[in-house]
Amino acid sequence: MIVFPNAKINIGLHVVAKRPDGYHNLETVFYPVQLSDALEMAESRETKLTTSGIEVDGPPEKNLVLKAWQLLSRDFDLPPVHFHLHKNIPFGAGLGGGSADAAFTLKMLNDFFSLQIGPGELKKYASTLGADCPFFIENKSAFATGIGNELSPVDIDLSEFQVVILKPGFSVSTQEAYGNIVPAHPEFNLAELAKLPVERWKETVINDFEKSVFPAYPEIKKCREILYQQGANYASMTGSGSAVFGLFRHLPADFDNFIPRGIYIYR
C-alpha cells in the first residue's frame, strides 16, 4: 500500500500567549498543498523503515513513521511491516512534512488492517505525535488554535492560484524562532479569512515569526520579496520558516530565472 503525505502552509500565524507549560497558544490557518512524500508499507518479518530522497537525519526508531506504528501497536495486534519513505518535503521549513508522514501512517495502518478507528480517535492518536499532526487526518483547510491542535473548519479555496514554495538551503530552529517572539493579541481574526479576498491579504494576514526571523535570516525575507516582484498576489513565510510561499493567479513563464542559486523551488 502506498500513500502520499502532503505538506501544509500556514496562512497567517499569530502567537497570542505563552502557556504555563512553556508552549505557546497560536492562531493560524492550515492549508494543504500538493508537495508530498511517498510512503509505502508491506507486511514483513520485522518492522523497519528505509528511506530515499532527501536524507533523513537521526536513527529510524526516532522517525515519526515508526513512532506512529508503535503507538497503534500498543492498542492493536499489528503484524510487523516494512515502511519505505521517499522524502520530498524539506525539513525545518515550516511545511509539516514529519507530521504529515506520521498522520498518514496512522491512516494507512487503520485502512490496511481494518482497525475501524474513527477520525476523532485518529486525531487523538495524532496529537500525541505532534501539535499539527491532527490536521493531516482530515487534511482540509482549518483554523487552528491552542498549540495548533485545536481545529475548526474554514472554507478556503485556492484552486485559482498556483502555490510556489521557495526554501533557502538552511533550516530555522523552531526553538530559536520562539525564543525571539513576543506574544500579542492579533489585529485580524484569522477565523474570518474566507471573507477576505486574497488580494487584500498582503496588508492584513501576517505571520508573527517574520518579525524575528527576517532580521536574523535576510535570505528568507529576500525570497518573499522575489515572489512579490514576480507578481504573487500574496506571499508569506510558513510556520517559523525557512520556507516562503507565494500565491499566483498568473505565474511568469520565466519565473525560475529570477531565483538565486541555492534557493530550492517547489510547486
Image: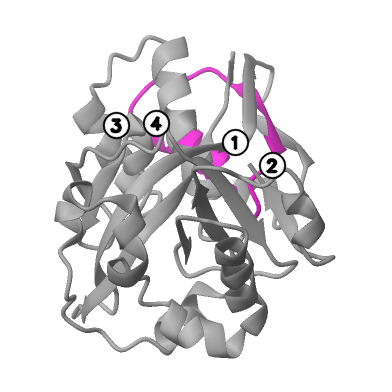
Please say if the residues under marks 4 and 3 sit with CB atoms less than 8 Å apart: no
Q: Quadrant of residue 76?
A: top left
Q: Check disc 4 and report its element: helix, strand or loop.
A: helix
Cα distance, mark 4 to mark 1?
23 Å
Q: Residues within 10 Å of mark 3 (few under 14, many from 20)?
A: many
Res. 72 mark: 4
Q: Which label's residue is closer to the chain start, 1 or 3? A: 1
Q: Which label's residue is closer to the chain start, 4 or 1? A: 1
Q: In what quadrant of the picture does the N terminus appear?
A: top right
Cα distance, mark 1 to mark 3?
21 Å
| Residue 13 x %, y % | 32, 66
**Outermost residue to the right:** 261
Which residues fall within the magenta stretch? 63-90
Q: Is residue 61 left or right of residue 187?
A: right
Please say if the residues under marks 4 and 1 sit with CB atoms less than 8 Å apart: no
- Residue 82 part of the magenta-drawn span: yes
Residue hosting label 1: 36
Q: Residue at x 28, y 40 (%)?
A: 156
Above or below for 162 versus 240: above
Q: Residues within 10 Å of mark 2 (few under 14, many from 20)?
A: some
Q: Is residue 20 left or right of residue 8?
A: left
Q: Check disc 2 and report its element: helix, strand or loop.
A: loop
Disc 4 residue type (three-letter):
Leu
Q: Residue at x 74, y 56 (%)?
A: 264
Please say if the residues under marks 1 and 2 sit with CB atoms less than 8 Å apart: yes
Q: Which numbered disc, 3 or 2, marks the residue closer to the eye?
A: 2
| Residue 15 x %, y % | 27, 75
Nearer to me, 177 or 251: 251
Q: Which label's residue is closer to the chain start, 3 or 2? A: 2
Above or below for 216 versus 89: below
Res. 88 mark: 2
